[in-house]
Amino acid sequence: MRLVQVFVPRGKYDLVLETLDRDGIEYAVTDAIGHQAFEAIVSVPVSPSGVEPLLSSLSEAGLDEDAYTAVLAAETVVSDRTGHQHRDTTTRISREELRARASDLAPALSTYLALLVLSTTIATAGLLLDSAATIIGAMVVAPLMGPALSASVGVVVNDERLASRGVLLQAGGLLAVIATAAIIGFALRGTVLLPPGFDVASVPEVRERITPDVLALGLALGSGAAGVISLTRNVGSVLVGVAIAVALVPPAATVGLGIAWGHPSMILTAGTLVLVNLLSINLTALLLLWASGYRPQRPEHAEHAFRTLVSRVAVLAVAITLLSVVLAGVTIGTYQTASVEHDVQTELEAMSDDPAFGDLQFREVSVDYELIDVYADRRPVVTVLVERSPGESEPSTLAETVRDRLQQATDADPRVTVELVDTQYSE
């Protein structure tokens, strides 16, 4: 339940009561004491879904912005009369509460940046340590849900200030994440905190962000939808905030690490993932908020809000489509590299069991075939370790035979290096 308290300006008392009586709404009146601008305080108990119709009726009747209205959440209501007016037909909160909650979720700039820097520091450590638990823990701190949703709320309720603040906080926040991760990366490179020859691109948690595929859209779209549901129904905002932060902070931190280590491909792929996730969250939030029936309070502002919505949705959809081409390319390239490695391993196992090679055992040492090699049309480089018994000879054309078998198995033209070792086993 909600308790709506209207501080009625002088001269509007009869208008307010007539409107409430006409709509069959129960209320209580308290004389306003202590401020000459208000004549009375009218208290109305309503359901969450009844707040918006109530305020709209008062506004249409002529209660202007000189009135002061407070919407209070009633934790417990002891009465059998609560179902008599404004029965719940929906679980969403009112437009006024939506705007207030979205504004509250976007903290002050100093607090916002401080929390983001702390979250990025923890997340960057988690990336370098290959610790998924650390990364998820860092997301609890990241305050990205508020700006992501306030930008969309501002559009649908025609609050340009709220929308602009949400967009600026999102853009500035992600730049702060990238800068923080880059600074940490520069500070840690070459120190005893990282092992000699440390390759940041080979860390599994980092590789996950630099080899994104089209399925990554699912996280962003789902996070945006969950964010709108939690905001409009006032549930689970902390957990949903974690999902939104997971879609944005780790890949943005990966961009910063790519800058620190000088990896252009890391910057490109992780940066693409950040942008796709950011735009998808905003697109989903815009569409769901509008579909949920949220509109500006004044009917004359609805057309302007709709035009703004359409233009933003169009821009976001086009941008996501273009960036999704990059994701599709990464998906196809990653599949091809994985296929080559799988086919090499399978073929070497088959060769080890082939009587034509006697007692020779074939082991894969490495397959050097990365995403960039696929589109640069570079050949895979395969190193094969061949074990033989001491004194046993191998065919003089062994390297060519291995290459031919692997070429047929992979439909590629790999460069093959064969390393021979004499192996003894004791029983």
Image: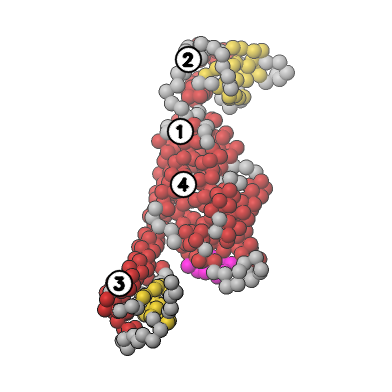
Kind of residue at badge 4: Ile
Q: Amino acid at mark 1?
A: Tyr
Q: Residue at x 26, y 78 (%)?
A: 356
Q: Name the element at disc 4.
A: helix
Ranked by sequence position, the earlier of labels 4 and 1 is 4
- Circle 4 crowding by C-alpha within 10 Å: few under 14, some 14–19, many from 20: many
Q: Amino acid at mark 3?
A: Asp
Tell me the residue that label 1 is attached to.
Answer: 294
Horizontal and vertical percent position of residue 416: 37, 80
Q: Earlier in the sequence, mark 3 or mark 2?
A: 2
Pointer 3 and pointer 4: residues touching (CB < 8 Å)?
no
Kind of element beneath mark 1: loop
Callout 2, which amino acid?
A: Gly
Q: Which label lies toward us, 3 or 4?
A: 3
Residue bounds of the magenta highlight: 258-265
Instruction: State yes or no: discs 4 and 2 in contact (Cβ < 8 Å).
Output: no
**Is 205 displayed left or right of 376 in the figure?**
right
Pointers 1 and 2 in contact (C-beta within 8 Å): no
Tell me, for residue 83, which label it has, or none.
2
Q: Secondary structure at mark 3?
A: loop
Eye-nearest disc, 3 or 1: 3
Mark 4 or mark 2, earlier in chain? 2
C-alpha distance separating marks 1 and 2: 24 Å
Could you say which disc has been placed on residue 353 in the image? 3
Distance from Cα at disc 3 to Cα at disc 1: 67 Å
Q: Which residue lies at the image location 49% right of the left edge and 61% below the top edge? A: 204
Observer-nearest residue: 272 or 366?
A: 366
Q: Which mark is residue 281?
A: 4
When asked about the image quadrant of residue 290, the answer is top left
